[in-house]
Amino acid sequence: MYSEKVMDHFSNPRNVGEIENANAVGEVGNAKCGDIMKIYMDIQDNVIKDVKFKTFGCGAAIATSSMATEMVKGKTVDEALSLTNKAVMEALDGLPKEKIHCSVLAEEAIQSAINDYKKRNGEAPAENKCDFCCQKCNDVKND
Amino acid sequence: MNSVYMDNNATTSMKKEVLDAMIPYYTDIYGNASSKFYKIGRDAEQALYKMRESVAKSIGAANVNEIYFTGSGCEADNWAIKGIAFANSKKGNHIITTKIEHHAILSACEYLEKHGFEVTYLDVDEYGIVSAQAVEDAITDNTILISVMTANNEIGSIEPIKEIAEIAKRHKVIFHTDAVQAIGHMKINVSELGVDMLSLSAHKFHGPKGVGMLYIRNGVRIDNLIHGGGQERGKRAATENLAGIAGLAKALEIAVKDLDENTAHMRKMRDRLIEGIRKNIPYCRLNGPDDDRRLCNNVNFSFQYVEGESILMMLDMKGIAASSGSACASGSLDPSHVLIAIGLPHEIAHGSLRLSVGEDTTEEEVDYVIETLPPIIQRLRDMSPLYEGVEKGDN
């Protein structure tokens, strides 16, 4: 069902935890849908010095959180913002169709943390790229 | 421990005696039971009669010709629902069932709704039990069928079948019960229960996959689901799967013979598991009844702040096979309809884990699960943003 890379990132997730004095925190998802991702970042001079995550969700949700945090660590804010769910999926050697939304969630989580950072610095947030592939979650949010 | 199988509600291992009973119908007596003009065909026909007789005896049917073999429990359920609906549509168009039935029943009912039938899906209580009174209250002049499962496959709740059968009889409504999970786990006698129809599936009680049965009391009018030849008294076409039926009959015979011993053992294993989990894992909830209304082999817990598929994956890494009602585990976006029906919020339903023991489950295996599960739950909780506040509150 899952690729070896997904299994590796699920069983040994990188960057799990919190950052005590994070200057960027983002949370996306919904417990009702079954997945929540929370990202903590320490951003210095526009560079993501450290990043940690906490995720409630399935194997793919944990693996995409792990991979996405790996991919943005040490990158500039703009580089991190250009991270796509597709890139996360490719880095994990693919995901089953019904788990694609997990990679979307990872992309949104990174974006949400960076927008928090921008907000704290009085900058305009980046545009939400979510295409609501997970229609159900969208419905739940509108309950 | 290499592998611990804790998913006996999904399927069971097949017994050696069952396999031995099947082999001759693949090797020697391979004749078609409908080909009566030569010996090997007649041998098959006679063997089939004996198997039917054995099944009738095992479930307490009054007549051998009330036993109809099918290709699965799912087919038996579909046939019961659609066959009764279409055969009795002139009498009425109303069907009563519950919200916690297997999808074989629910999806068949939803299909009928598209064809002019009306279906009442009854609520269940927090333990997953439907009230017989609610069934009676739902009956109208148009009601042609009531279908309530004997025991639930996810949370093990045992339904008041005998009471519902009495109500159905009083109101002259046909009553079907899906006993797929119940056979081998509790005493089932169709005459004592008073049901008109009952479905079962061989692979749930150590028989082969791909063979089931529908008991239809004589006098019940039912349309065919599968049209074709004259097999099964013209009611279910297809060359009989003789080897499969032999396996079903043998497995059922053993299940009935060893019922008391097996259920006592499974109950013991189940209770050990429930107690061990409760003692070692905080913030958990047993789903389903906590008394004798629970199937002897079913354990279902929700663990707060974690998601079911992750639990399954981590258990698998430790060699434990289990199942979950979480949306992710089912490949859909919604958690189990059964867990929602008993009133669990979505987030609690997502964290469900079903462990179902079998007659061959050992104490060592149960203890291995009790030892392995708590660190897995803790590891996932430590990773969960929902657990953050709880953790801090604890300190």
Image (tube, helix red, strand yellow):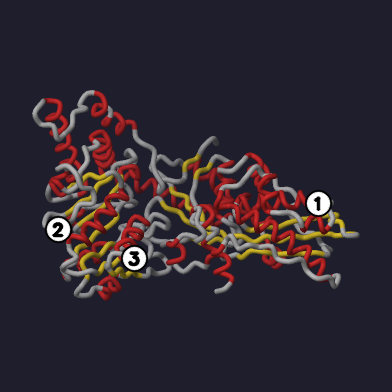
Q: What's the residue at 14%, 38% (across, down)?
A: B49
Q: Where is residue B388 in the image (x, y as percent from the top left)?
A: 70, 63
Horizontal placement of B287 versus B143: left or right?
right
Does dot 3 land on a helix, a strand or a loop?
Answer: strand
Residue extending furthest right? A45
Read off the chain for label 1. A
Q: In which quarter of the image is the C terminus of chain A?
A: bottom right
In the image, what residue type sits under mark 3? Thr
Does dot 1 land on a helix, a strand or a loop?
Answer: loop
Q: Which residue occupies the foreground of this view, B376 or B63?
A: B63
Read off the chain for label 3. B
Give the Cα distance between marks 1 and 3.
51 Å
- Please tell me how crowded label 1 is: few (under 14), some (14-19), or many (20+) other residues with Cα within 10 Å: many
Horizontal placement of B290 versus B139: left or right?
right
Q: Name the residue under label 3.
A: B98
Give the Cα distance between marks 3 and 2.
22 Å
Q: Which residue occupies the foreground of this view, B209 or A128?
A: A128
In the image, what residue type sits under mark 1? Lys
Q: Which residue occupies the foreground of this view, A97 or B182?
A: A97
In the image, what residue type sits under mark 2? Val
Q: What's the residue at 14%, 46% (across, down)?
A: B234
Give the Cα distance between marks 1 and 2.
69 Å
Q: Name the residue under label 1.
A: A73
Q: Are marks 1 and 2 on the same chain?
A: no
- Please tell me how crowded label 2 is: few (under 14), some (14-19), or many (20+) other residues with Cα within 10 Å: few
Residue extending furthest left? B37
The disc at residue B220 is 2
